[in-house]
Image: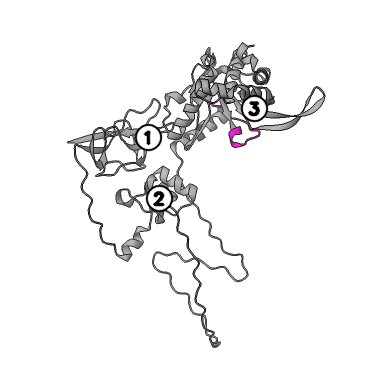
């Protein structure tokens, strides 16, 4: 019995999706709920599960196709068994083999094109296992993981000395074979010839969405940034004192992000405009604190939300952040988990950034940028001492947040981190 495979309902505000990688090919055995293909939207990657046990029948939409909810993309032969493996076909003629090296980049999925571009690969050298010899993501990953044979240099035979021949008129250059573009050799005395390759790869949906959001933030807000620095020694001492006990008690490591989340929540309570947003001609003051945490993923930067962060303890925050990081790498975050938010925290310090200007995440009006902690000379009580210092940046929408409020918010965060007891006492 043939069972239809259709595109599932897409998240709200997502009109269509792109098929980026078929994990099965026609004739392959499948299990119920096994992922058949990845659907890439501008927010998340969704999976299309098999509706029944059996064999994948026809694939009606190839990699790279744009589909909508309910579209028929394949069929599954329920209860069928995969055909027995057949003997390998005889080698094709040389002419056919040569033509097989011509690769159509447009027929590749975005994921395959991105991997080829990132690693500078020649797609003609990678054997394809997809329909019609098409390259799949697994083909490229297998090629990258396979050990490359070492090639020893072959010495060219030394020709015997020949008697000088009489000068002859220069012969016309030989015609290039059909389909081959001749490459000019450098003229005597000219710079060595360097081949400069280019490859055009379309943006992924997530990257295109990020670009759209950043441009929206630049053009629709009056964004300014204020900076400060934080002495991390007190919170580092507290963390070192209790990190082993904390991990044994809660089953998660104690990091610095949870301290910053709680410090931000307390600062937002003092400066509600930083937690507000603009809706037309109205200012919406949020009575809750949904903090977005910027997380890096293989597809780009995503911002899952800590809902009602004011009700969460340090252990709850750390567990949620670990879970967000893991599922961001797996691509299993949901749209609901990345929708909304009243304020965002981003940590460029994990990549070594010393100072940067974070950009707003509309419609939010504020974002805090954390950076790398470095020992610097500071003056304390008239003495020059070395302290672990972190630069922090607060970008804000000047349309509803005045400079006094923006600076006061950042100072409140600084005070809480430099005296962690303030976080526990909410003072």
Q: Secondary structure at mark 1?
A: strand
* Mark 3: secondary structure: strand
**Residue drawn at the location 59% of the way across and 36% of the way down:** 351
Nearest to the eye among marks 3 and 1: give it: 3
Q: CA distance from mark 1 to mark 2?
A: 20 Å
Q: Nearer the viewer, residue 426 or 254?
A: 254
Image quadrant occupied by the C terminus: top right
Q: For residue 253: magenta?
A: no
Query: Residue drawn at (35%, 33%), measured in percent from left and top?
Result: 47
In what element is the residue under mark 2? helix
- In which quarter of the view is residue 227 placed? top right
Of callouts 3 and 1, which one flags the residue occurring earlier in the amino acid sequence?
A: 1
The coloring applied to the image is one colour
Residue 116 picture location, percent across and down: 45, 49
Q: What residue is rendered at 52% in x and 78% in y?
A: 158
- Left/right placement of residue 372 relative to residue 72 reads right
Q: Which residue is mark 3?
A: 393
Label whose residue precedes the other's in the sequence (3 or 2): 2
In the image, residue 267 sits, relative to residue 27, either above or below, namely above
Please tell me how crowded label 3 is: few (under 14), some (14-19), or many (20+) other residues with Cα within 10 Å.
many
Q: CA distance from mark 3 to mark 2?
A: 42 Å
Q: Is residue 122 visible?
A: yes
Read off the magenta span.
349-362
Which quarter of the picture shows residue 387?
Answer: top right
What quarter of the picture does the N terminus occupy? top left
Q: Position of residue 174 (x, y in %)?
A: 45, 74
Residue placed under numbered mark 2 in the picture? 105
3 and 2 marks in contact (CB < 8 Å): no
Q: Are the two marked residues, 3 and 1, in contact with CB atoms closer than 8 angstroms?
A: no
Q: Which residue in the structure is indicated by mark 1?
A: 17
In whole angstroms, how far apart are the C-alphas of marks 3 and 1? Answer: 36 Å
């Amino acid at each position: 019995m043939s069972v239809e495979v259709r595109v599932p309902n897409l998240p709200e505000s997502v009109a269509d999706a792109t098929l980026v990688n078929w994990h099965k090919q026609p004739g392959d055995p499948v299990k119920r709920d096994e992922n058949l293909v990845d659907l890439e939207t501008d927010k998340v990657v969704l999976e299309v599960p098999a509706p029944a046990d059996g064999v994948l029948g026809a694939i009606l939409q190839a990699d790279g196709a744009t589909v909508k909810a309910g579209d028929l993309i394949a069929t599954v032969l329920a209860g069928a068994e995969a055909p027995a493996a057949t003997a390998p076909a005889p080698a094709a003629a040389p002419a056919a083999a040569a033509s097989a090296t011509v690769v159509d980049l447009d027929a590749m999925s975005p994921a395959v094109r991105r991997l080829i571009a990132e690693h500078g690969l020649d797609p003609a050298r990678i054997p394809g296992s997809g329909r019609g010899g098409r390259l799949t993501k697994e083909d490229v990953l297998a090629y990258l993981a396979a050990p490359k044979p070492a090639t020893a240099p072959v010495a060219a035979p030394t020709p015997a000395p020949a008697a000088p021949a009489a000068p002859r008129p220069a012969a016309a250059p030989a015609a290039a074979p059909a389909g081959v573009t001749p490459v000019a050799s450098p003229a005597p005395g000219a710079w060595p010839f360097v081949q400069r390759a280019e490859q055009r790869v379309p943006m992924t949906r997530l990257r295109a969405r990020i670009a759209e959001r950043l441009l929206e933030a630049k053009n629709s807000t009056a964004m300014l940034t204020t900076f400060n620095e934080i002495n991390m020694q007190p919170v580092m001492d507290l963390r070192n004192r209790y990190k082993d006990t904390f991990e044994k008690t809660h089953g998660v490591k104690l990091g610095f992000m949870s301290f910053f989340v709680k410090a931000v929540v307390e600062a937002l309570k003092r400066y509600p405009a930083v937690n507000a947003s603009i809706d037309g001609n109205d200012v919406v003051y949020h009575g809750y604190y949904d903090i977005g945490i910027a997380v890096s993923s293989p597809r780009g930067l995503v911002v899952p939300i800590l809902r009602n962060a004011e009700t969460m303890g340090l252990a709850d925050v750390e567990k949620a952040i670990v879970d967000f990081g893991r599922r961001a790498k797996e691509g299993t975050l949901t749209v609901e988990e990345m929708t909304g938010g009243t304020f965002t925290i981003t940590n460029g310090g994990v990549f070594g950034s010393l100072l940067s200007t974070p950009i707003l995440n509309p419609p939010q009006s504020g974002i805090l940028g954390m950076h790398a902690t470095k020992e610097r000379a500071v003056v304390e009580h008239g003495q020059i001492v070395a302290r672990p210092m972190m630069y922090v940046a607060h970008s804000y929408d000047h349309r509803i947040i005045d400079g006094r409020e923006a600076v006061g918010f950042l100072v409140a965060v600084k005070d809480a981190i430099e005296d962690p007891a303030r976080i526990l006492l909410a003072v």
